Image: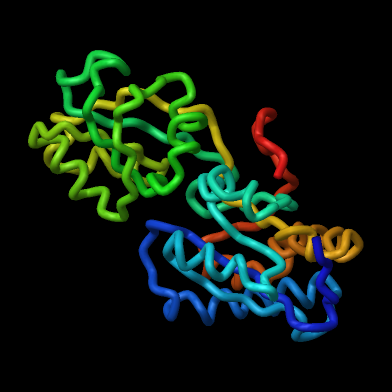
Amino acid sequence: MGTLLLASLATLVFCAPGYPGGAGDAQPFIEQFASAATAISGWPPGSLAAVYDPTEQGGLAKLAGSDAALAFVPYAFYVQHGGELHLTPIVQADVTGIGTQERWTLVGKEGAVSGPTSLAGYTLLSVAGYSPDFVRQWALEAWPLPPDVKIESTGQILSALRRIAAGEHVVALLDQTQTAALATLPFAPQLKALAQSAPLPVAIIAVINGRVPPARVRTLQQGLFKMAHEAADADTLSQLRLKGFVPLQLPAHTAAP
């Protein structure tokens, strides 16, 4: 476990698999965020870079880089990869329009699903489908899926919902924003919410493999907490659909890295 010297360049990796937006589109905003976080935390100027990747494999490759010190990832990504990457969460994101926690909703065709066992042979599609552990053990902890359910990742949730309405053996696990939009669909009456998760964190920032010294972690935490109260920093946060950061509120049975 190596500790990076923060006087040299370290990297904050943003990774949000399945959500829209290309790396080039996000890059200016995350660079602005890294600069603002560095300044408000009292870190040496220019000591923190930032990169973005919208794919699971691309994000994993960047997070494995020798200069990667911090990760900004959805909670589903942390559940799936936190152990192998030795991620230690330090703050939780407060996301505009969602908050610090969200509920995930399993949606199927009206009248076609009577309970978990009736999903045998089905395919489950979700923006979080890259994280089967999150889907089975967290989002659907109280609604155990049959072992043969295929869990697949997709950023095309509208297409998935159309397939459900058409009667295919498909269900979809929706995040809070996607669930809220269900009522606007012309085929909404053909869909049914089957199960809903307990409130779960939306996203976290974590240290990778102990690469930030504890003293630097503490100053970064305090700086991130203050960003929402500084006008210029609040504007920077808004560009990333963030309201700010809060102390960790992870579920009690979250595994340690």
* Residue at the image point whose x is 12% and y is 41% from the top: 186
How many numbered marks are there? 0
93 lies above or below 27: above
If the image is split into quadrants, where does the C terminus sit?
top right
* Residue at the image point whose x is 85% and y is 82% from the top: 7
Give coordinates of residue 237: x percent, y percent.
60, 66
Give coordinates of residue 228: x percent, y percent.
69, 61
Determine which quarter of the picture holds residue 4. Answer: bottom right
Q: Horizontally, is 77 left or right of 50 in the view?
A: left
If the image is split into quadrants, where does the N terminus sit?
bottom right
Residue furthest toward the left? 166
Along the line of sight, the residue nearer the viewer: 75 or 55: 55
Q: Horizontally, is 142 left or right of 186 in the view?
A: right
Q: Horizontally, is 166 left or right of 242 in the view?
A: left
Along the line of sight, the residue nearer the viewer: 184 or 85: 85
Q: Can residue 21 be seen?
A: yes
* Residue at the image point whose x is 25% and y is 36% from the top: 123
104 lies above or below 120: below
Colour scheme: rainbow
206 lies above or below 142: below
Give coordinates of residue 205: x percent, y percent.
66, 57
Give coordinates of residue 69: x percent, y percent.
71, 68
